Image (cartoon, rainbow, N blue to C red):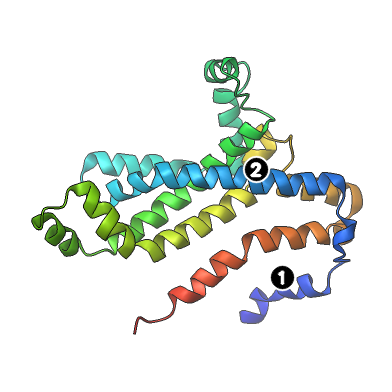
Amino acid sequence: MLAFLSAPLFGLLTGGDWNPADLSGADLWAIVTSLAGGAVAVTMIALIGTPLAFYLARTPGRISTIAEALVLIPMLMPTLALGILLATVFGPAAPAGEFFARIGLVLTNSPAAFVLAALYSALPTYVLTARSAFVEVPTEYERVARTLGDTQLRVFFRVTLPLAQRGLAAALALCWVRALGEFGVVLIIAYFPAGMPVQLWTDVQDLGIQAVFPLVATFLLATLPAPLWLGLRARRRPA
């Protein structure tokens, strides 16, 4: 099984030309699009997803169950289907798309559309992983802080967040991978400007697999190190 799982690494080491000088202008633009759009999306996800994850972790009941189901639905949808459905909502002929276009945000084939695709792709992953991190924080510490006079907001920032920081870091790392690696949704609503996944697909069609390894290497360097390090770090037992 380990040999089977190691097969991609063998392909990585024995593949085509890795010369960074072979990156084309389109490849470089795709790298910039993915890194910039991914950074904006992950920042927005952290800001809006963290309170939702905390709510799901601390508020049992029917409403939170419905909220969690709504978070799960985009994750469970086939990505091409999700992209098509988003196009019907945010496309130029849709009411929401027309509204955002009037205020200067075109949500198809634009940098804003890339961020939108990354949001829908990565937000559920972050929320569910962050929720698990908050669940692991003992509520007794929060109650003690409240009895000492701290407000709920102060307890969240001074007690809950520090205790959940390792799990939240892992959630952000996974979110980053999902935001940069999404292909199906991006293919439908944000084909231009092409990010790294779409550019890789285009290059494979035009040039073949052996010619795309410089962009593959950049893609892997942008996505693999943080989640791999955090995953290995999480295995360490506390002293």
Specify the quadrant of the image occupied by residue 155. Answer: bottom left
91 up-or-down from 64: above or below: above
Quick one: SS at disc 2?
A: helix
3 up-or-down from 164: above or below: below
* Residue 160 place in picture, x, y as percent: 27, 58
- Residue at the image position 60 percent from the left and 24 percent from the top: 105
* Residue 109 place in picture, x, y as percent: 69, 30
**Camera-nearest residue between 238 and 93:** 238
Say whether disc 1 or disc 2 marks the residue closer to the N-terminus: 1
Residue 75 visible in the current orientation: no
* Residue 89 place in picture, x, y as percent: 54, 24
* Residue placed furthest toward the left: 147
How far apart, in angstroms, are the residues tagged by discs 1 and 2? Answer: 22 Å
Whether label 1 touches label 2, CB < 8 Å = no
* Residue 150 place in picture, x, y as percent: 16, 52
- Residue at the image position 63 percent from the left and 18 percent from the top: 92
**Where does label 1 land, which residue?**
8
> What amino acid is labelled 2 in the image?
Gly
Residue 200 visible in the current orientation: yes
**Where does label 2 land, which residue?**
184
154 up-or-down from 173: above or below: above
Quick one: SS at disc 1?
A: helix
Q: Is residue 202 left or right of residue 86?
A: right
> What amino acid is labelled 1 in the image?
Pro
- Residue at the image position 76 percent from the left and 59 percent from the top: 216
State which quarter of the image contains the N terminus.
Answer: bottom right
Q: Is residue 237 left or right of residue 93?
A: left
